[in-house]
């Protein structure tokens, strides 16, 4: 038996009749041109061969009587692959909207804890000779990083890859009796006071370093000198001169933030990663800044359309991986979160990018004040019975309808593979993340890149956000708004990024103009343009090619030089005569 960590177990405790702890992924494939090829049989064969290295798919949870401690994992003695693997289909015409409806119904059902906590669906009936594979795995089993690793094990980089023989060292464990579980709990609980004491010493030292309190640091050093060596010291971090401002106590109320139902809606969209990178380059921001700004702009327009836009920014919870690569346990949650305001109150598109960048920097500064792994380690000491009952009581009393939420929604941006992936010869076209929502937060926006695409998965409560398709459309529209504001023209149609992009072409023209800028800079009158501002020469020649833009810039610089020279001569002449120098012309 292996005990769940406090963070892993928290995803079990959060579950109620309307909140579920599983996360999902929806992979869209193109069928290979092979006679008699079956998507279901090919996927089943792949799973069966690789199960020996897929530990999260083989283990089941064992609850502790009276919830006296966190549950345990055991190797399922009655594992049945056919129970977990299912086959279904979408009705004609098999478009993405009908696919999203089928998946939304699947994610609106909890996983059975009497079996390993996952299901997989092979979904047929898609148009253009495609099929889908949906994996539904409990968050107690994996986080985003380990989920990506799981995906890498299931899929191949070579369409003709053969499965090498994998040694099968599985050792199914019998389901323990309650007496056996309690005996194990007693042994683990006896060690907890020592673990808690060591964690408190770490906390004391971290707070001392944070506040530059030598007394606290010294007290921690004394405690560290006691018998039984404690955890390894962390090097002190040089602190900024000014602490970041404290976060607000709560987020503004919106229609997204009420008690949720068990019913879900899902919307899927794809944008060009090339287009988003062109906006990033033109504005001097990061890719994540642009994604967050896209979400902020779309949410602003959506809430405006419903007459529910708050006068202060929405607050987003952004999951953060704290993996170091040195973890002893491979399949577990090593995840924390930062909370940042997103500028839904800012009407200017480019200022939204600047606002996101500033907010994320401040949120990261707060996040780095204390070691993130220390915060997650405290979850190990949370009382399971209390956590579960608190969640159920909050749901029963509909607390989310009475109090402002701590945050409005979850936004996550996950970098994905940049090389093509295959499943038994079928090429992966898109990978849509399908996350989860919790009580009081009726919307989750998760984005994952794959090749040259950004795949958006929007999961929402069916009652709170019935028109999630409209919000998804606004996300793509906001990319166009940002592209135009950055002087890049309109982006191309959404897809897998294989086609040429008008935004990328405009970005190339912009770089050509910058290369012609030295001619203007030599006059001493024309300085470099800001990354977030479109110059007049750019606006005047947006439809032209790079040569015309360069000529326009050079011509303007030449005229400016002539006017400056004439003005200087006039000043010199009048000064010689003893008269008052003339005011420089504004045009000069």
Image: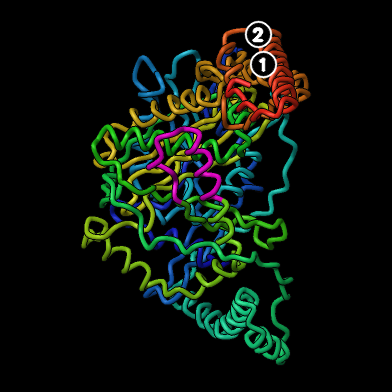
Q: Which residue is mark 1?
A: 509
Left or right, residue 131 beside residue 527: left
Q: How far across and down, in percent of the image, does residue 461 sit?
A: 30, 42
Say whether residue 507 is visible.
yes
Left or right, residue 42 beside residue 569: left
**Camera-side residue: 10 or 528?**
528
- Rendered residue at 54%/58% (across/down): 336
- Rendered residue at 45%/39% (across/down): 434
In the structure shown, which secondary structural element does the residue marked by tag 2 occupy? loop
Q: Which residue is mark 2?
A: 545
Question: Quadrant of residue 244 in the image?
Answer: bottom right
Answer whether residue 91 is magenta in the image: no
Check disc 1: other Cα within 10 Å, few if <14, some if 14-19, many if 20+. Answer: many
**Camera-side residue: 256 or 557?**
557
Say whether residue 513 is visible.
no
Answer whether residue 345 is magenta in the image: yes
Residue contact at pointers 1 and 2, CB within 8 angstroms: yes
Q: How far across and down, in percent of the image, does residue 112 sit?
A: 39, 52
Left or right, residue 83 beside residue 209: left
- Rendered residue at 47%/61% (across/down): 61
**Which stretch appears magenta?**
341-360
Q: Is residue 257 above or below residue 510?
A: below
Q: Quadrant of the C terminus?
A: top right
In the structure shown, which secondary structural element does the residue marked by tag 1 occupy? helix
Q: Is residue 227 above or below residue 212?
A: below
Overall secondary structure of the magenta section: helix
Q: Quadrant of the N terminus?
A: bottom right
Question: Quadrant of residue 215 in the image?
Answer: bottom right
């Amino acid at each position: 038996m292996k005990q769940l960590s406090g963070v892993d177990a928290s995803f079990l405790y959060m579950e109620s009749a309307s909140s579920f702890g599983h996360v999902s992924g929806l992979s869209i494939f193109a069928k290979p041109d092979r006679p008699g090829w079956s998507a279901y049989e090919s996927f089943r064969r792949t799973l069966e061969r690789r199960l020996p290295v897929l530990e999260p798919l083989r283990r089941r949870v064992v609850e502790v009587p009276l919830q006296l401690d966190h549950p345990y994992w055991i190797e399922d003695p009655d594992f049945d692959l056919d129970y977990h693997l299912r086959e279904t289909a979408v009705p004609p015409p098999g478009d993405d909207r009908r696919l999203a409806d089928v998946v939304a119904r699947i994610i609106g059902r909890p996983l059975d804890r009497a079996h390993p906590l996952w299901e997989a669906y092979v979904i047929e009936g898609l148009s253009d000779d495609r099929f889908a594979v949906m994996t539904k795995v409990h968050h107690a089993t994996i986080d985003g990083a380990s989920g990506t690793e799981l995906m890498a094990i299931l899929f191949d980089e070579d369409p003709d890859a053969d499965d090498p023989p994998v040694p099968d060292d599985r050792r199914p464990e019998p389901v323990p009796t309650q007496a056996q579980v309690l005996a194990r709990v007693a042994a683990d609980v006896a060690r907890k006071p020592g673990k808690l004491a060591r964690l408190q010493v770490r906390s004391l030292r971290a707070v001392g370093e944070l506040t530059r309190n030598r007394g606290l640091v010294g007290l921690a050093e004394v405690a560290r000198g006691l018998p039984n060596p404690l955890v390894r010291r962390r090097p002190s971090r040089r602190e900024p001169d000014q602490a970041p401002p404290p976060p607000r106590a709560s987020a503004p109320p919106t229609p997204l933030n009420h008690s949720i139902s068990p019913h879900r809606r899902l919307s899927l969209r794809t944008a060009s990663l090339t287009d988003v990178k062109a906006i990033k380059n033109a504005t001097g921001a990061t890719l994540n800044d642009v994604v967050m700004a896209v979400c902020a702009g779309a949410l602003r327009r959506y809430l405006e359309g419903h007459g529910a836009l708050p006068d202060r920014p929405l607050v987003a919870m952004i999951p953060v991986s704290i993996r170091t690569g040195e973890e002893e346990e491979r399949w577990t949650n090593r995840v924390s979160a930062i909370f940042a305001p997103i500028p839904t109150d800012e009407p200017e598109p480019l200022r939204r990018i600047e606002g996101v960048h500033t907010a994320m920097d401040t949120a990261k500064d707060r996040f780095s004040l204390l070691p993130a792994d220390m915060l997650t380690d405290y979850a190990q000491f949370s009382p399971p019975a209390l956590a579960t009952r608190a969640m159920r009581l909050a749901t029963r009393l509909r607390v989310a309808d009475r109090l402002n939420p701590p945050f409005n929604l979850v936004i996550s941006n996950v970098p994905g593979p940049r090389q093509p992936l295959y499943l038994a010869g079928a090429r992966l076209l898109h990978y849509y993340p399908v996350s989860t929502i919790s009580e009081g937060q009726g919307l989750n926006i998760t984005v994952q890149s794959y090749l040259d695409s950004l795949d958006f998965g929007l999961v929402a409560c069916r009652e709170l956000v019935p028109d999630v398709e409209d919000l998804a459309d606004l996300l793509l529209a906001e990319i166009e708004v940002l592209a135009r504001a950055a002087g890049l023209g309109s982006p191309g149609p959404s897809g897998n990024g294989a086609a040429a992009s008008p935004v990328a072409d405009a970005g190339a023209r912009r770089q050509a103009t910058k290369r012609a800028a030295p001619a203007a800079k030599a006059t001493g009158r024309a300085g470099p343009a800001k990354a977030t501002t479109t110059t007049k020469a750019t606006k005047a020649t947006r439809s032209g090619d790079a040569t015309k833009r360069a000529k326009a810039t050079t011509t303007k610089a030449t005229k400016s030089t002539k006017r400056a020279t004439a003005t200087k001569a006039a000043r010199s002449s009048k000064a010689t005569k003893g008269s008052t120098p003339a005011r420089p012309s504004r045009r000069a």
